[in-house]
Amino acid sequence: MMMDLQRLMAAQDFQSLDELRAFMTQILGKQVPSFPEEALNVSEQAEDLVLEAYELPAAKAKAKVNKALKLDPDCIHAYEFLGSQEKNAEKAIPFFEKGIAIGRKKFGGEYLKIHKGSFWGFYETRPFMRCMQNYADCLYTIGKVKESVAILEEMIELNSNDNQGIRDQLLLFLIKLGENDKFVKYAQMFKKDSLAFPLFNRALFAFKTEGDSKNAVKQLLKAHGSNKHVVKRILSNKPITHMPEYYSIGDENEADYVAQQSQIIWKETEGAIEWLKKHT
């Protein structure tokens, strides 16, 4: 629907902001029309093929995506799809790297000057941003934490509102690396965040930098109050392999998500587990 809307908007020849507003009012509440294949350029046709691939079995899906790449070798969404199908991070990385390289070239220069800070707001940049997120995850998985952080920081620059929610991982990785100044910078940028993940990040950072201080304990108790299940998950000796597809504030799925991301870093931070037990 978003893609069809963007195509519809691109087909108009607005001469003023008032014309744009009038057009948006006119289509409000109506079904956005799809464009027939003959009206699409090869890049748009390739994009449609990738979208169709998500509804197909693996073999047929890859064939569909390869067909898309023959139409448009620079289809970022195709590389995102192929990378996401790989279960091994090292095998997935080349696909995401290819998508990112194309995106940096396609969305650099004047495009970057105009749209930097709001990349998620445009449909055409979303596959690029998703490639970056997946790439950062893969880098972290294979132990390249600094490289992962560099990608996550670039993502914040490109989309300061962070619609993809990568800031929690970024802050956690900065704790691991001991990048205290950067942690403070990004924590201040997103100081209104009040879910369990950012709150436990702040508590861990306070403990690592201040020890068993009043402020650190205050941060921990605030985090613990946001979700009573997280501490139990972090303290568990059982690895958390399940990543919930969704969660609600304060529920066990949220705790699984937070612990799956942060359990290892809590346990490798000297004294953090004992401190966690002491105050909760």
Image: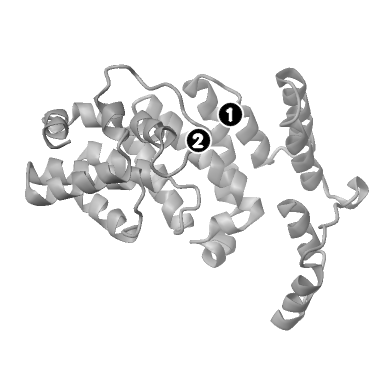
x%, y% of residue 197?
A: 34, 43
Is 67 rendered above or below residue 152?
A: above
Q: Is residue 165 above or below residue 87?
A: below
- Image spot of residue 166 (x, y percent): 42, 45
Name the N-terminal-most of marks 1 and 2. Answer: 1
Three-letter residue code for mark 2: Asn
Res 156 seen here: yes
Q: Secondary structure at mark 2?
A: helix
Residue 238 occupies which quadrant of the picture? top left
Task: Tell me if label 1 and label 2 are in contact, CB under 8 Å.
Answer: yes
User: Circle 2 is placed at which residue position?
Assistant: 134
Q: Foreground residue, 99 or 263?
A: 263
Q: Residue at x 66, y 52 (%)?
A: 124
Left or right of residue 230, residue 9 in this image: right
On the picture, is 67 further left or further right than 168? right
Name the element at disc 1.
Answer: helix
Please, is residue 192 above or below residue 53 in the view?
Answer: below
The residue at the point 48 percent across, 23 percent down is 89
**Residue 188 image offset from top left, x and y in percent:** 28, 59
Residue at coordinates 64% horizontally, 41% vertically from top-left? 76
The answer for how far apart the CA atoms under marks 1 and 2 are is: 8 Å
> What residue is pinned by disc 1?
83
Q: Is residue 179 visible?
A: no
- Image color mode: one colour
Q: Quadrant of the C terminus?
A: top left
